Amino acid sequence: MGMRTLNRSGQKEVKIVGVGGAGINILNNLNIKSNMATELWAINTDSKSLVRSKISNKIQLSNDGKGMGGDSIKGWLVAKQADKLVGLVKDTDAVILLSGLGGGTGSGVTPVIAKLAKKFGIKVFAIATMPFKHEGLSRRKKAEITLGELSANVDVLKIIENETINAMKTDLSTAFGHIDMVFKTEVENFIKTIKSEKK
């Protein structure tokens, strides 16, 4: 499928999507504002996370507002049944997905959105964090499986290891601030790439 119609600003549209609790936290900390060419979206199964988010565009996937309890299969099933996600991806030109892998929503939902976007011929960029060592081998394995699924359906995939935070010789607040800046830089680079390809 071809590119979408230009909006009034003369630019193609980009949607930056935070998926799951970690992805939404990342999106909240980006300090990137929505405009005619860029929309911010928060997607989660946990309604409390969505209520706390300062992002105005929100999609709650679960009917009961509860999270997936770390079950990525449940997250995948909920996403597959969500018609709202079709509306999210089909009316844009590129999607930038932000998520933390290893949990129920991040690992279950992110690959579904990526695959759906590719089905509509949309550019997909993704940035994902991998679990800390102390979160256990099961969560790590789940994250690695998700990486394989994402790789098959994205144009560019960037991985950030949470464990690098522990390697920083500074306080946690400063370390997380550094990670936020890495995300912001990557997102801005993605947007520049997308816009340069539209001319």
Image (cartoon, helix red, strand yellow):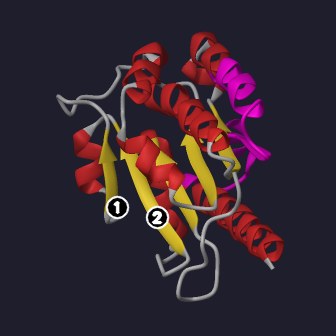
Q: Give the left or right position of residue 59, taking residue 153 as reference.
A: left
197 relative to 87, above or below: below
Residue 79 magenta-drawn? no
Q: Give the left or right position of residue 83, taking residue 183 as reference.
A: left
Q: Are marks 1 and 2 in contact (CB under 8 Å)?
A: yes
Where is residue 8? Give x, y as percent. Answer: 53, 88
Q: Report whether residue 51 is seen.
A: yes
Residue for point 55% across, 31% down? 112
Residue picked out by circle 1:
57
Where is residue 101? Give x, y as percent. Answer: 58, 31
Where is residue 64? Give x, y as percent. Answer: 17, 28
In the figure, residue 30 lies in which quadrant? bottom right
Residue picked out by circle 2:
40
Counting residues from the start of the chain, the first of labels 1 and 2 encountered is 2
Looking at the rendered structure, the kind of residue marked 1 is Asn
172 relative to 34, above or below: above
